[in-house]
Amino acid sequence: MDQDHQNNGIEPEPLKNNEVSENTGTEHEEDFALLFEQSSKTSQRFEPGQRVKTRVAGISGVFVYLGLEGKSEAVVDLKEFLDAEGIPTVKEGDEIEVFFISFDDGMRKFTTLTRGYSTTSLSNLRDAHEAGLPVNGKVAAELKGGYEVQVGKVRCFCPFSHIDLRGTREAEAYIGQTFPFRILEYKENGRNIILSRRVLLEEEQESQKKVFKESLKPGMDIAGKVRSIQKFGVFVGIGGIDGLIPLSELSWNRGEKPTDLFTVGDEVTVRIINIDWDRERLTLSLKAIQPDPFLSVLEKYPPDSMVHGTVVRLESFGAFINLEPGIDGLIPISKLGAGRRINHPKEVIEVGQLIEARVLEVNPEKRRISLSMEQKISLENIVLPSVGELVDGTVERVLSSGVLLKIKDGTTGFIPNSEMGTLKGTNHNRMFPAGTQMQAVVIETDAKRNRVTLSRSKVDDKMERDTYRQYRDKSHEEEQASGGLGSLGELLKAKLGL
């Protein structure tokens, strides 16, 4: 290493006229120590790459002079401060930040690093390498495995993987262009110098990311781009940081899938709902910037109104019905059986089925809508059929436990499988589809619960009994007229056991 470099930015104090440099006496040794001490007080030590804040002392020639103490000049190349029209962007008194490079030609050399350090000498390249400072280089040609880069008059090499963040091999995009590079290796006294532009780009990216992170706050709305779509959510790139929109924050409509809403590359605006830099997690929401549909539910779905919806989920306690995107209502299991007790909603309805229901209660604060599949009926005005009465009805629905039959006055009766009069295992769905006309006999009623239990198997028996009674009544009239019971009447009475 040359002597200038060893000085680390401290220039030697010149000898006075009456001093003899060869004198090695004690007196002169003391004088030299005094001079060295004085020099230390007026000159500051700088290490290569050291960051310094200072002020511009003046601009002259090709240098910007810095207001640093010391007997040698502290300078930065003026071209580092020239704009596109060649006009200096600083003036005397401006505070700037610079980095020490070396002590050279009697001057302490600094750089701003804004464009990279421009140099033409091997010694300066060595200094830049040791200081970790970037240098400006011009991409001259494509070579095997990388590019030839000219730094001043020195030939250097940049591998393909270090020309940018992607390691592109499109030479036409770089040849002839000048960029800042970091010196990765300085070997064989400068005959083998390897550069990297990617390292500087990564440092710049990390620096920008750090500043960007500090600016992010929960509640902010920010634009991003969809980078990946997964089953559990969508990753959105925001300023070099990936944030996740969980499934629950994609839409007010829980049934929507990420693939139905996005494709990779879509630009979206999202809201930041949580930041955890310790775990590198940024949680986003698309739903939060959309209007809450529950704000208008009272107007759309007032109590006692009839609504239509689709069954989206069945639970042991009831069924969830989607009325519109973001609005689900719940039918409790007690409101599903049309007056009869059921063990699970799947006995009555199934997912995907379109149904009509009545609104029982709306609570926007709790985001709750209670529904019922039972019509609102005034029990005071309803007249249930009598036990033993033969009724006509229409099959409303076939359940696993029996058949619901719509009879007069909007009343629904239930025929248990044991009262259907069919063989065990018969497929009632196929034999009696919805809309089938049917007769049944009332075997039980419950006015308080508006419940009617029916029997199909007793219809024939009922009809036979009614036929006999009709015949008996007629025969009784004839007997009174003729004075005796006819032989046919006796035979029928004996056959029916009456």
Image (tube, rainbow, N blue to C red):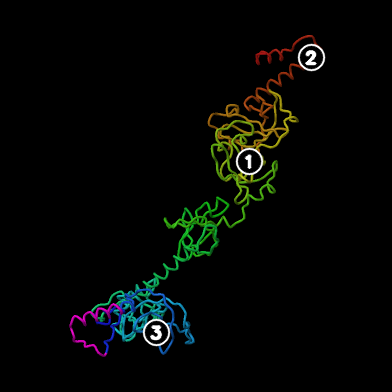
Disc 3 marks which residue?
Answer: 77
- Cα distance between the residues tagged 3 and 1: 77 Å
Q: Which mark is residue 478?
A: 2
Q: Quadrant of residue 383?
A: top right
- Cα distance between the residues tagged 2 and 3: 137 Å
Foreground label between 3 and 1: 3
x%, y% of residue 263? 51, 62
Part of the protein shown in magenta: 17-38
The verdict on residue 184 being magenta is no
Q: Around disc 2, counting alpha carbons within 10 Å, would you say few (fewer than 14), some (14 to 19), or many (20 or more)?
A: some
Q: Secondary structure at mark 1?
A: strand
Q: Secondary structure at mark 3?
A: strand
The verdict on residue 30 being magenta is yes
Q: Quadrant of residue 114?
A: bottom left
Residue at point 47% right, 53% down? Answer: 232
Relative to 301, say whether 411 is above or below: above
Would you say the residues marked 2 and 3 are in contact, meaning their CB atoms lie under 8 Å apart? no
Disc 1 marks which residue?
Answer: 370
Left or right side of 306 for 230 = left
| On-image quarter of the N terminus | bottom left
x%, y% of residue 205? 42, 69
